[in-house]
Image (cartoon, rainbow, N blue to C red):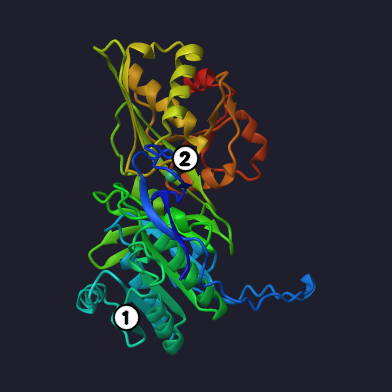
Amino acid sequence: MAKTKVKYICRACGYESLGWLGKCVNCGGFNTFAEETVSVTKTFVKETTRGKIVSLAEVSSDHAARIPTGIAEFDRVLGGGFGLGSITLLGGEPGIGKSTICLQIAKQLAEKNLKTLYISGEESPQQIKLRAERLGTVSENISLLCATNIHEIEKAVREYRPALTIIDSIQTIYHPDIPSAPGSVGQVRESAAWLIRFLKDSNFAAVFVGHVTKEGALAGPKVLEHMVDTVLYFEGERSQNFRIVRGIKNRFGSTNEIGIFDMRAEGLVEVPNASELFIQNNLDIPGTMVTACLEGSRSFLVEIQALAAHSALSLPRRTVTGLDYNRAAIILAVLEKKCGLGLSTQDIFLNVVGGVKVNDTGADLAVALAIASSFRDTVFDKKICAFGELGLGGELRSVSNIEKRLHEAEKLGFETAVIPQSNLKNLQKKYSLEIIAPRTLAEALAKIG
Ligand SMILES: [Zn+2]
């Protein structure tokens, strides 16, 4: 047995310290440190069989060696499907739909006669069966195993030889040689490392489900991110119906792709046309503007809402939902300084309709126009949309993939698009949209306000 010693490990990010810390120096989390006993010498270092030199030219880059899930929105995030021997980490808050999507993937594979082994450490076979019945995913090709010991899991996978192994959740799995409790950083990391080693060698694809808990009672999936091939996170509010699966890391394809799903009683339903989900406005009200944001290879329209109301506070309120707060502060400052809008006495509320989060700076212009519209209490033509990044000097900077954005707006029946002048040279084809191309934000307000 290995020598053990006590360490303090951040449950959110896995940062190790010899003493307890109130605030993690790595991820900034408060009260995330827990005392853990770690073994100093790793007792289960595997003799590797991979130490053979091969010429780069001889290495096969067989992209066909993938297992498509048959769910287009999910396959795009994965980059075409699960790679053979690839490990995918699927993180998200409890109840957001991780187990649901796993069963739906298993069902798709079952129809292609591929076996899935669903290993649950949390639910009984009866509970899983109930969910599978509700989702209509009962199949002979899907088998269940309720186990938490890595040796039991390894034995089962070697015997059953599934095309896909789902481990729900990785935080319930334990390695019997590690003294710390299941769900602790040491235990999650070591048992995952063990599973990854044997799954990789045997070329089985696997999904590790990892819970993200706000309280940080369990070691977060973050501690595993560097060990797996693909990291996907579920996003979305539980009160909202739509869910986004976002690729954070992908050794087999591009990151930044997202898949959009609608959560219904029968499971997660793909949303191929996301714009329709996020644009529901048919009202002529001040303070709204539509923009196209870009996520990976897809573009969809979202509606930005702003409310500027006279403030009774000496320090007016700024509430930003779905957008970056600092970005919003810059936009407000530019509106004040370069366009002469007296916003410093106003409470400003900003929201992206539908609860989606927009990280794209191409939404700046739309945010600025929505604020100006609410402040002046004027209504823009509702068939207008705007894209453009705002510079500190009030100038409009070009956005990437302008054609994709315009195409999406055209498809949804928009009649006018406001784009930065510098983007005009990127336009190859004619659009049925009328294009207004100002150089600055002030010019944009003058032209359409
Ligand atoms: Zn941390």
- Say whether disc 2 or disc 1 marks the residue closer to the N-terminus: 1
Specify the quadrant of the image occupied by residue 252.
bottom right
Q: Quadrant of residue 340?
A: top left
Closer-to-camera residue (442/435): 442
The alpha-carbon separation of the residues under discs 2 and 1 comes to 40 Å
The amino acid sitting under disc 2 is: Asn
Residue nearest the observer in this picture, 214 or 217: 217
Q: Residues within 10 Å of mark 1 (few under 14, many from 20)?
A: some
Dots 2, 1 in contact, CB < 8 A: no
**Residue 448 visible here:** no
Residue 171 at x, y = what percent?
35, 63
Q: Given this view, does label 2 or label 1 mark the residue nearer the observer?
A: 1
Q: For ligand 1, which image quadrant applies?
A: top left
Q: Is residue 81 left or right of residue 177?
A: right
SS for tag 1? strand
The residue indicated by pointer 2 is: 359
Residue lying at 36% horizontally and 62% vertically, measured from the top left: 180
Q: Position of residue 41 (x, y in %)?
A: 52, 64
- Quarter of the rendering occupied by the N terminus: bottom left
| Quarter in which the C terminus is drawn | top left
Residue 345 x, y percent position in the rendering = 33, 11
Residue drawn at (45%, 31%) of the image: 366
Residue 228's x, y, as percent?
51, 63
Q: Residue at x 28, y 66 (%)?
A: 267
**Residue where numbered disc 1 is placed:** 145
